[in-house]
Image (cartoon, rainbow, N blue to C red):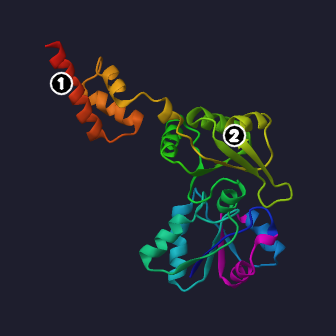
Amino acid sequence: MLYLVATPIGNLGDLSARAIETLRAVDCIYCEDTRHTGLLLQHFDIQKPTRSLHTHNERERTEEVVEALKSGREIAYVSDAGMPGVSDPGAMLVDACYREGLPCTVIPGASAVPIAAVLSGLPAQPFSFFGFLPRESKPRREMLDAIAGVRHQVILYESPHRVQATLRDLLDRFGDGPAAVLRELTKKYETVERGTLSALVERFSDEPKGECVICFVPSAKEEAEAPDLDALLCELLETESVKDAAAIAAERLRLPKKTVYKRALELKNRKSEENA
């Protein structure tokens, strides 16, 4: 059996009795960082061999874990903190087990995502988790485009030195909606800062300490400020073909391409008739 074991995100008291029992029973513990996990195991007097399994060797070590499971060994996997597979390695292990017909299970425990969803004070059903925003401009823009279609709570992870920049990006893209920044979750100095995105931009002018979670509800700013379809198409048709104008308008207004193309063709034909 492969056990994916959730570990504390700050408070060691959050490691469950079941998790401790599992880690003591397995033959080997694979972990994101053997040094980090070694401190956790030492605290609970768990003496088991450890092997690294992180982003850079995940494929190779996944094959190793599969072979160990096939030989009848009991294996646990832990990430540095929280739930494996949530912004951490783990998904590849589960997929490999399913493909090979091997049993796997999760030992539940701490995870920043559901904690933040509730502690933010924003409506938590439904919510969407997007992990870390990419730093590169194109993938970052693509993720913001995906978030733009959401009208409920969105949860992001962010490093402390990028919190204000990310809050500013969200404000510029989605308008001044409700938000919260949660820091040092489950730890002694856990804090929750709530307000509008603009207020939080000001509040985090100084870099905070500790990993942060940003929760917010995207507004319909872009929809409210966007031109209506006919006006946009008429403007685009001055310089673009029907096909290109429709493609640009569909992407900008997030409308079905076929519908927009049909309307662009109607407007083009109407203008041709008026000029005849």
Mark 2 vs mark 1: which is more N-terminal?
2
5 or 206: nearer the eye?
Answer: 206
187 or 42: nearer the eye?
Answer: 187
Residue stretch in magenta: 13-34
Q: Provide residue 211's location: percent of width, then percent of height.
A: 74, 50
Instruction: Judge whether residue 19 is colored magenta.
Output: yes
Q: Secondary structure at mark 1?
A: helix
151 above or below 199? below
Q: The disc labelled 1 sits on which kind of residue?
A: Asn
**51 sits to left or right of 192:** left
Q: Is residue 211 visible?
A: no
Residue at the disc numbered 2: 196
Q: Provide residue 171's location: percent of width, then percent of height.
A: 62, 35
Q: Secondary structure at mark 2?
A: strand
Label annotation for residue 64: none
**194 sits to left or right of 57:** right
Label annotation for residue 269: 1
| Structural crowding at the residue carrying mark 2, measured as other residues with C-alpha within 10 Å and reported as few (<14), some (14–19) or many (≥20) | some
Q: Provide residue 255's location: percent of width, then percent of height.
A: 36, 40
